[in-house]
């Protein structure tokens, strides 16, 4: 599992300034010379270092798991990226002033 995580993150974190993980061994060494690798040690009862924490990603995965389990019940590997894109969009727009459906309708009517 460790090498798969590293290869995937090497491709997808090109512009990240920092990667924050917990102490799971597969997360070690994810950062590169351009990316700071910060670790939160949950096993030592550490939940935050100054303004560094893993709550955001844990909240996102909680939303994804609840959504897939309650709405779709199961997801195939073929369609997983589409579901993750949907929930990523929902999570990134959770604080918008207008309803998410209204936002989608407005964007659909914009000229390309």
Image (cartoon, grey):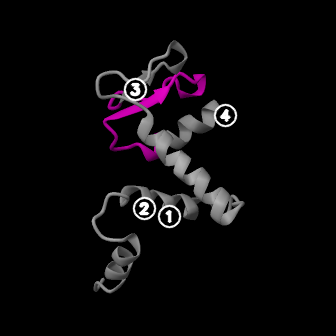
Magenta highlight range: 10-35
Q: Residues within 10 Å of mark 4 (few under 14, many from 20)?
A: few
Q: Are marks 2 and 1 in contact (CB under 8 Å)?
A: yes
Give me the C-alpha separation between circle 2 and circle 1.
5 Å
Tell me where residue 5 appears, x and y as whole percent. Answer: 57, 37
Q: Secondary structure at mark 4?
A: loop
Tell me where residue 42 appears, x and y as whole percent. Answer: 51, 21
The answer to which of marks 4 and 1 sits earlier in the sequence is 4
Q: Secondary structure at mark 3?
A: strand
Q: Name the residue tied to disc 4.
A: 1
Give me the C-alpha separation between circle 1 and circle 3.
27 Å
Tell me where residue 2 appears, x and y as whole percent. Answer: 62, 31
Drawn side of residue 78 relative to residue 89, left or right: right
Give me the C-alpha separation between circle 2 and circle 3.
25 Å
Q: Name the residue tied to disc 3.
A: 37
Q: Nearer the viewer, residue 1 or 64?
A: 64
Q: Name the residue tied to disc 2.
A: 89
Q: Name the residue tied to disc 1.
A: 86
């Amino acid at each position: 599992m460790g090498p798969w995580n590293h290869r995937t993150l090497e491709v997808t974190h090109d512009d990240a300034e920092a990667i924050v993980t917990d102490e799971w061994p597969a997360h070690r060494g994810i950062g590169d010379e351009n990316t700071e690798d910060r670790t939160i040690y949950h096993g030592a009862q550490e939940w935050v270092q100054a303004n560094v924490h893993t709550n955001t990603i844990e909240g996102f995965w909680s939303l994804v798991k609840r959504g897939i389990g309650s709405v779709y019940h199961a997801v195939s590997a073929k369609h997983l990226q589409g579901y993750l894109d949907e929930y990523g969009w929902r999570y990134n727009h959770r604080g918008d002033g207008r309803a998410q459906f209204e936002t989608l309708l407005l964007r659909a009517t914009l000229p390309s």
